Image (tube, rainbow, N blue to C red):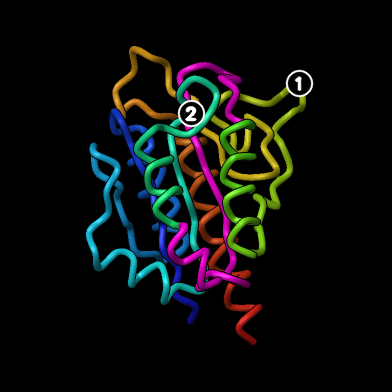
């Protein structure tokens, strides 16, 4: 079995719920970036030992949170030694608006993965885009490059839609299955 980790920051708990769903699908270890943008020292060891790294951040002002950016900047140490080269990478995000510029956050995560010499895994899911589609369907937000969720600004994390969380779970499962295939 491949070792998968989910490294993420969550400002209000919505991205945490998404990270938990991704980790459930992937059978992954959760590594939370704290409110100051730090990871415990042991988390860096887990990232170095991982076959797949799934990154998550809320979308704030069209990109990742500053806490996630601090983690990304600190990842220059493994970048310098190419410690994460050829690992699988994937990403997910959440914002209050239906669009909310989530794609730019996924592009940021993709670029970070490419800087590390990684291989990117998308959702592999068809969108729910027919007239019969309901907001709670899997991949209703129609993302191919990574998992997306939308949580109204006045909704608690407990009120997240089950379709977005199921999208996240299936996404995590896909990343873990791809890591197993690559390990051969």
Residue 94 magenta: yes
Q: Nearer the viewer, mark 2 or mark 1?
A: 2
Q: Tell me the residue that label 1 is attached to.
A: 131
> Residue 90 at what x, y percent from top left?
57, 54
Q: Look at 43% across and 23% down and name the residue there.
A: 151
> Residue 43 at what x, y percent from top left?
30, 64
142 or 114, which lies in front?
114
**Residue 183 vertical position relative to residue 172 in the rendered view, above or below:** below
Judge from the rendering whether residue 108 lies leftward or rightward of residue 26; answer left or right.
Answer: right
Q: Secondary structure at mark 1?
A: loop
Count of residue discs: 2
**Residue 170 vertical position relative to residue 152 in the rendered view, above or below:** below
Q: Earlier in the sequence, mark 2 or mark 1?
A: 2
Q: Look at 57% across and 24% down and name the residue there.
A: 135
> Residue 172 at what x, y percent from top left?
51, 57
Cα separation, mark 2 vs mark 1, equals 28 Å
Q: Secondary structure at mark 2?
A: loop
138 or 157, which lies in front?
157
Which stretch is magenta?
A: 76-102
Taking the view exactly as shown, the residue that stands out farthest to the top is 154
> Residue 184 at what x, y percent from top left?
64, 87
Q: Tell me the residue that label 2 is attached to.
A: 59
Say few, some or many: other residues with alpha carbon within 10 Å of mark 1 (under 14 / 14 to 19 / 20 or more): few
Judge from the rendering whether residue 147 lies leftward or rightward of residue 153; answer left or right.
Answer: right
Taking the view exactly as shown, the residue that stands out farthest to the right is 130
Q: Look at 44% across and 39% down and name the residue there.
A: 57
**Residue 102 vertical position relative to residue 180 in the rendered view, above or below:** above
């Amino acid at each position: 079995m491949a070792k998968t980790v989910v490294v993420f920051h969550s400002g209000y708990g919505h991205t945490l719920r998404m990270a938990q769903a991704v980790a459930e699908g992937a059978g992954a270890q959760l590594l939370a970036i704290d409110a100051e943008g730090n990871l415990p020292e042991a988390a860096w060891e887990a990232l170095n030992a991982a076959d797949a790294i799934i990154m998550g951040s809320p979308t704030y002002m069209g990109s990742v949170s500053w806490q996630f950016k601090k983690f990304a900047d600190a990842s220059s140490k493994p970048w310098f030694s190419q410690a994460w080269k050829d690992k699988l990478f994937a990403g997910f995000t959440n914002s209050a608006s239906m669009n909310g510029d989530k794609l730019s956050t996924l592009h940021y995560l993709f670029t970070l993965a490419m800087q590390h010499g990684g291989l990117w895994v998308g959702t592999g899911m068809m969108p729910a885009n027919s007239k019969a589609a309901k907001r709670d369907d899997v991949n209703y937000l129609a993302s191919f490059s990574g998992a997306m969720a939308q949580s109204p600004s006045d909704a608690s994390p407990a009120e997240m839609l089950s379709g977005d969380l199921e999208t996240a779970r299936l996404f995590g499962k896909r990343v873990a299955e791809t890591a197993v295939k690559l390990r051969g």
